[in-house]
Amino acid sequence: MIGLRWKLWGLVLGTILVVLGGATLIGRHLMQIEIGRYVSAKHRQTAMSIAPVLADFYQSHDGWSGISGPEGVGPLPSRRQGKPFPKLPPNSLKLQFRPLILHQRLIVADSRGNVLADSMRTLVGQVLNAAELAKSAPITVGGQTVGYLLVGAKSSIEAGSLESLFRRRLTSILLLSGGLAGLLALLLGGAIAARWVGALRSMRAAAHKIASGEFSGRVAANRRDELGQLARELNTMAEQLQKAQRLRRQTVADIAHELRTPLAVIQGNLEAMAEGMIPLNTERIRSIHEEALLLTRLVEDLRTLSLAEAGELSLKLAPLPLDPWLRALLQSLQSGLKAKQLSLTTEIAPGLVGLADAQRLRQVLLNLLSNAIQHAPAGGQIELRVCSQGSQILLEVSDNGVGIPPEELPHLFDRFYRGRRSRLRPGSTGLGLAIAKALVEAHGGRIWAKSAAGQGTTFALSLPREVPH
């Protein structure tokens, strides 16, 4: 199997070859066009500088007689300022170019484009086409065009010229530069690919550890690109899984601890009665029955909590008029209030209608009110306040007990957590507040606690209001 590193390297190499190849071809083509334009302009400039000499030749010879000899176009003497061009005998003008026209081809044509002389002696008698005439310099005498001079007209000659050599050298330089740039880009691309692959390998190793159940591994997440974001999300997932693993282990240990006590009591009593060590009477049977009820309540609480946390708890939401419903609920607590001589103060805003499951909300409030009765001092006071806050309904249950230490407040709603206030409470499973929190959040609300040492405790929860139609 081809590794990702080689695939990335191959992708970089292929991209570089395509880009550089295309750039080289386009650059070479554009360069050839520009060089062609430059050569044409230079040839025309050369022709323009020689045309006056040929005009003097035409004027001194009364025509083009003698322009071409057996060796082509003859030598072109310099034009003498202020003196007429000397009349030379026919066939005496040979082509022995000065440095100005070295390695260049000269073609002289009459006013109709008929070639009269050619330094290569191949086009004499032929006719220049329109493109060649456009590149030629006109030869004028007395304001009239008597002929044309074309320099370097044929590419077959230019192939061995200095311009062609210049073109080949520029092409070589372009290819060499492109090759060096491609090699540098390949090395840089390989380094980048190696870095990417290294980061992916690190994340793959961490994912493999997570898949095998080892959640302690982390990957470096100092990059600021998508790979860095992926690494941070992988670390976050590992942290959450590690936290869930610790919670699962702690939950299993707590459940085992909570089940062990009532089971041990039931088992001990049954064994003692079976061996005749204690009498089998109603009091012993009632004790075993209470432990069995505690087990049943613990199992039911665990089931409710698991369903609520998994979002699978079925709620029967319906409009709930709170004032009459709460007053009926408080009637069921009168015996507990009278037993400790507690006073109950209520402040319930009239006309409030919540959207709630009456049975589940009753379970939550009974837990909060029972806790308040349990921890309020004898002769103390309990307050229930209900008011509206925008689209929410706020319910508060307060007592004037000893309060909760600040270090315990963050853990009040953890499952199986028992603070100092609840350790001596008989029949407690440590799940009441955890279940209350899960049920309130299932309603779309939230619950929290406020307390200060020696100033009592207030539990508050918010629930959505019924929207009137």
Image (cartoon, grey):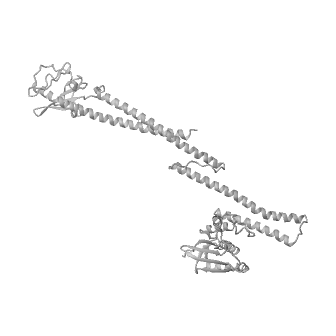
Q: Nearer the viewer, residue 123 or 170?
A: 170
Q: Nearer the viewer, residue 341 or 434?
A: 341
Q: Quadrant of the N terminus?
A: top right
In x, y percent, where is residue 45? 21, 32
Residue sitting farthest toward the right: 276
In x, y percent, where is residue 252? 72, 58
Q: Is residue 223 visible?
A: yes
Residue 17 sits in which quadrant? Answer: top left
Residue 146 sits in which quadrant? Answer: top left
Instruction: Tell me what residue is drawn at x 82 percent, y 68 percent.
Output: 288
Residue sitting farthest toward the left: 83
Instruction: Tell me what residue is drawn at x 63 percent, y 54 percent.
Output: 241
Could you tell me how many numbered marks the image carries?
A: 0
Q: Is residue 312 visible?
A: no
Is 432 placed left or right of 319 in the picture?
Answer: right
In x, y percent, where is residue 227? 53, 48
Q: Is residue 187 above or below residue 451?
A: above
Residue 391 sits in which quadrant? Answer: bottom right
Q: Nearer the viewer, residue 267 or 106?
A: 267
Is 308 placed left or right of 20 in the picture?
Answer: right
Q: Is residue 209 above or below residue 271?
A: above
Q: Is residue 376 above or below residue 187?
A: below
Q: Nearer the viewer, residue 405 or 2?
A: 405
In x, y percent, where is residue 447? 61, 69
Instruction: Tell me what residue is drawn at x 22 percent, y 25 percent.
Output: 99
Q: Quadrant of the C terminus?
A: bottom right
Is 396 placed left or right of 27 in the picture?
Answer: right
Is 60 placed left or right of 434 in the picture?
Answer: left
